[in-house]
Amino acid sequence: MSEMRAARKLQSRTCFGGLRKRAAEKLAQAGIESAELDARLLMSFASGLEAVELVSRGAQETPEDIAARFETLVERRFRGEPVARIVGKKEFWSHEFLLGPDTLVPRPESEAIVEAALAAKADRNAVLRVMDMGTGTGILLAAILLERPNATGLALDRNEDALRIARANFQRLALAGRASFVCGDWGAAVGQKFDLVVSNPPYVGTSVIASLKPEIRDHDPALALDGGMDGLDAYRAICASLAGLLLPRGAAVLELGLGQQTAVSEIAQRAGLTVNDVKMDLAGHPRALVLASGKDKKALGSIREPH
């Protein structure tokens, strides 16, 4: 009987459910709040099984190769690497996007940019030309093109490796035929005009980067984080170029860092732009600044803030 109990105990530690439970406990000890979810996602990635399959196989012995792979992934998470970096993908706007070392991990807050852009150009069937400045994974432009079937876009980034990831994501979403990709620094490399310009620029002050959470500081690319000493360098460059990029009645939507609404609004106004609205994120922070050229003060409709 003792041998049977020992065998069952051993199996409980090496079955799918047992391994996942132990991993969650280990991650929780590291202070990771999403320990159980992370363990489940990593087991799914290691095994190639969906969540429902993992539940049904919870008591089954885990194949040695899968168990070894899972332990390696858990150790990476334990040391602070984000799950999205480990699995190489992240969901945004209900779609899955591939990541790369030179792209940010998409964050839910950035969906406010898409919402603001769609509200600014509310006609679903409108023929639009859209530009995403600093596209990274391409999430902003891709989400807009998915919602505006007659729109085409240009994805701009100063990093060729980031553009490679963006191209792959557009291929996966069957959007490649509606987008072009340009390597360049903000608007300097573009000789076109657009109905809509969106951007999530680097907006973290150089001296602040060291104090960011390790998941961001140690794993997101510095080029996509560092906004200069005051965090506003990219906004100055973008706003200076917008007058030459926007078509009549065109709109620009810029993501804001916390506490930056006033400073970015002043930069935009000094560049001859009009601040038409601001969109809050789900936490109630100003997240998306909606701009138009100075002569288009009534170009945009109002944007309702979430209740």
Image (cartoon, rainbow, N blue to C red):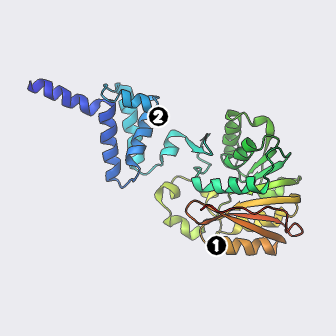
Within 10 Å of disc 1 (Cα), the crowding (few <14, some 14-19, many 20+) is few
Query: Residue 167's image quarter?
Result: top right
Q: How many marks?
A: 2
Residue under pointer 2:
45
Q: Amino acid at mark 2?
A: Phe
**Left or right: 288 in relation to 208:** right
> Quarter holding the C terminus?
bottom right
Task: From the viewer's perspective, tell me whether residue 51 is left or right of residue 105.
Answer: left
User: In the image, residue 16 lies at what x, y percent?
Assistant: 34, 31
Q: Which mark is residue 58?
A: none
Labelled disc at residue 230: 1
Q: Is residue 136 among what the camera can see?
A: yes
| Mark 2 residue crowding within 10 angstroms, few (<14) / some (14–19) / many (20+) | some
Q: Position of residue 217 (x, y in %)?
A: 52, 58
Res 46 seen here: no
Circle 2: element type: helix
* Pointers 1 and 2 in contact (C-beta within 8 Å): no
